[in-house]
């Protein structure tokens, strides 16, 4: 999937870390217009059988409640098939949004990718 | 709408509305990008509690989650099982995107809605509110079949800049439920509150300037006309916060509670002083004028980016638990909990204050009144919490050897 031309700041990529853990990296402005692409990729990976997903948004410059809603939707979908999700984020503003929405109660949020991956490893 | 407020606020507050500083640094378009600019440009005359709260709402990222708060409120107010907001995708017309959802379809956030798809898609096409009720309440066979399958559904257009950009939908799975005309009107009010939040969500802009200026100017305006209202708001805020914490409100709801407690009487700026200061009961038209203040306060607040969900709480702070309140006649749990907390704290503080029409009641008397009105005017659970808070405050104050001062 190519990044939408209308969202020069938003970009998405993903890579397998090992047989179990897969990382989706979202950068730039993850807003309501970026949300469909973000959601689609997340759901595609889950439907393809990925069960341990790390969402790395450490390069996101903006995130709104729609993007958080996509994360929560992904968590719900993963939960129904016994999978798990962790988020990489070190932006204090974004962390505040997670806190105020109560997301940090439901999804492990780590400041580095390695920490998030090791959270996944421990979970299993 | 702002013209009538101008004489009270002067240019300071009125001009600030919808003035949004564009974040110029795309590298950090988050919530604090604008604060430096705003602070440099506007030093509030008297930075009171309002300014501090306004700062905290922006710092906390609250303004970015208002849409999420509004769908939760919609479920409460409409007594619906699910609620969602869709917005047109400017880059891929004529599709729309689900930007917030609460209830069964929570995992639909971020999904695309095709032209005319679902009740929200139809509202985008038609530009007017729609209700689809079961039992053949609608005109076409297709819609009757849909309704029978899914229970009642309603959606209202979300419009700004002269165009319908989105829709707010509510649905219930209960097959016997219908959305009455009055409920659809309330849904339209909620959709109207969502308009500002959506405009802001699309622009990524922040609103610190207008929120701060409004709070300062609003508090100053109330204070100059009616010293009681401004002081009263601060005291209702202090009491409401403790009650909210006691009831275990989540963080976002506590922010809303503080802001709406402080601003609940903003609509009184539109009430003539002769009525505000009248010694004696209000009758007929005078009563109607004062009863308009919750809706008028909400009108003002929903024009402020970031305060849209606060606006709806202010709208409902004179609703009664038994459904006999105003402006929408909501009943029981359909009144947002935050509004129910403000209603009880507001009444307690008013009873224990000197008013033009009567002297202050002793705290014990006011507490008995609250207790007696639980289940009629007020939410019994809120009254319980408030009475516990007041009793423990009194105990603390007595322990400290200070007289209890309500």
Image: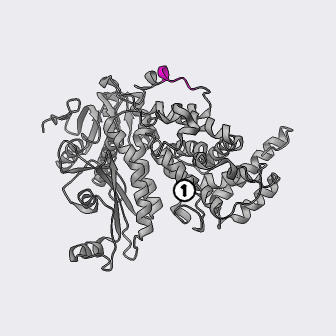
- Is residue B100 or residue A119 the one in the foreground? B100
* Residue B330, above or below A29: below
Q: Position of B39 compared to B404: left or right?
A: left
Label 1: state its secondary structure.
loop
Residue shown at 38%/38% (left/top)? Answer: A108
Q: Nearer the viewer, residue B324 or B291?
A: B291
Q: Nearer the viewer, residue B162 or A17?
A: B162
Q: Residue at x 27, y 53 (%)?
A: A81
Residue placed furthest toward the bottom? B135
- Identify the magenta region: B39-44
Residue B168's spot in the image, x, y percent?
Answer: 35, 56
Q: Is residue B253 visible?
A: yes
Q: Is residue B90 left or right of residue B85?
A: left
Task: Describe residue B360's horizontal placement relative to residue A102 as left or right.
Answer: right
Which residue does the image show at 35% across and 36% down from the upper left? A119
Quick check: can you spot residue A82?
Answer: no
Residue sitting farthest toward the left: A2
**Residue highlighted by disc 1:** B316
**Badge 1: residue crowd in 10 Å (few <14, some 14–19, many ≥20):** many
Badge 1: chain ID: B
- Spot occupied by residue B190 in the image (x, y as percentages of width and height): 43, 55
Q: Nearer the viewer, residue B213 or B63?
A: B213
- Residue B339 location, x and y as percent? 57, 54
The answer to which image quadrant residue B323 occupies is bottom right
């Amino acid at each position: 999937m190519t990044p939408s031309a209308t969202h020069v700041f938003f970009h998405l990529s993903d890579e397998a870390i090992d047989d179990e853990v897969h990382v989706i990296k979202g950068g730039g402005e993850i807003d309501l217009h970026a949300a469909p692409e973000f959601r689609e990729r997340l759901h595609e990976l889950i439907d393809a059988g990925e069960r341990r997903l790390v969402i790395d948004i450490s390069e996101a410059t903006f995130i709104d409640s729609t993007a958080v809603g996509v994360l929560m939707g992904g968590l719900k979908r993963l939960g129904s098939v016994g999978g798990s999700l962790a988020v990489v984020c070190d932006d204090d503003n974004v962390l505040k949004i997670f806190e105020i929405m109560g997301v940090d109660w439901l999804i492990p949020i780590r400041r580095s990718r390695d920490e998030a991956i090791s959270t996944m490893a421990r979970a299993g | 709408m702002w013209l009538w407020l101008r004489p009270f606020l002067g240019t300071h507050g009125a001009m600030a509305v919808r003035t949004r500083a564009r974040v110029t640094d795309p590298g950090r378009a988050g919530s604090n990008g604008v604060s430096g600019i705003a602070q440099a440009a506007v030093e509030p005359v008297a930075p009171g509690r309002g300014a501090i709260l306004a700062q905290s709402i922006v710092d906390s990222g609250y303004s970015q989650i208002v849409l999420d708060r509004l769908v939760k409120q919609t479920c409460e107010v409409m007594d619906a099982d699910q609620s969602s907001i869709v917005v047109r995708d400017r880059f891929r017309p004529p599709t729309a995107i689900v930007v917030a959802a609460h209830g069964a379809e929570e995992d639909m956030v971020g999904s695309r809605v095709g032209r005319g798809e679902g009740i929200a898609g139809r509202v985008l096409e038609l530009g007017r509110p729609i209700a689809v009720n079961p039992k053949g309440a609608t005109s076409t066979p297709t819609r009757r079949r849909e309704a029978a399958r899914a229970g009642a559904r309603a959606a209202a257009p979300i419009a700004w800049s002269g165009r319908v950009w989105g829709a707010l939908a509510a649905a219930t799975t209960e097959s016997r439920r219908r959305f009455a005309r009055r409920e659809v009107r309330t849904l339209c009010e909620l959709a109207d509150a969502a308009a500002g939040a959506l405009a802001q969500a699309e622009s990524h802009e922040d609103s610190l300037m207008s929120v701060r200026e409004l709070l300062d100017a609003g508090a100053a305006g109330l204070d100059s006309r009616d010293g009681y209202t401004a002081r009263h708001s601060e005291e209702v805020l202090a009491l409401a916060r403790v009650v909210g914490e006691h009831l275990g409100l989540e963080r976002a709801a506590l922010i809303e509670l503080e802001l709406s407690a402080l601003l609940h009487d903003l609509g009184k700026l539109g009430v003539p002083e002769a009525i505000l200061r009248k010694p004696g009961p209000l009758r007929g038209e005078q009563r109607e004028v004062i009863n308009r203040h919750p809706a008028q306060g909400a009108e003002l607040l929903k024009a402020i980016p970031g305060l849209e969900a606060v606006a709806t709480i202010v709208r409902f702070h004179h609703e009664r638990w038994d459904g006999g309140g105003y402006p929408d006649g909501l009943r029981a749990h359909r009144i947002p909990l935050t509004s129910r907390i403000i209603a009880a704290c507001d009444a307690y503080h008013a009873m224990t204050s000197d008013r033009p029409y009567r002297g202050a009641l002793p705290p014990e008397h006011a507490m008995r009144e609250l207790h007696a009105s639980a289940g009629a005017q007020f939410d019994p659970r809120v009254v319980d919490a408030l009475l516990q808070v007041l009793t423990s405050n009194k105990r603390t104050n007595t322990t400290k050897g200070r007289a209890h001062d309500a």
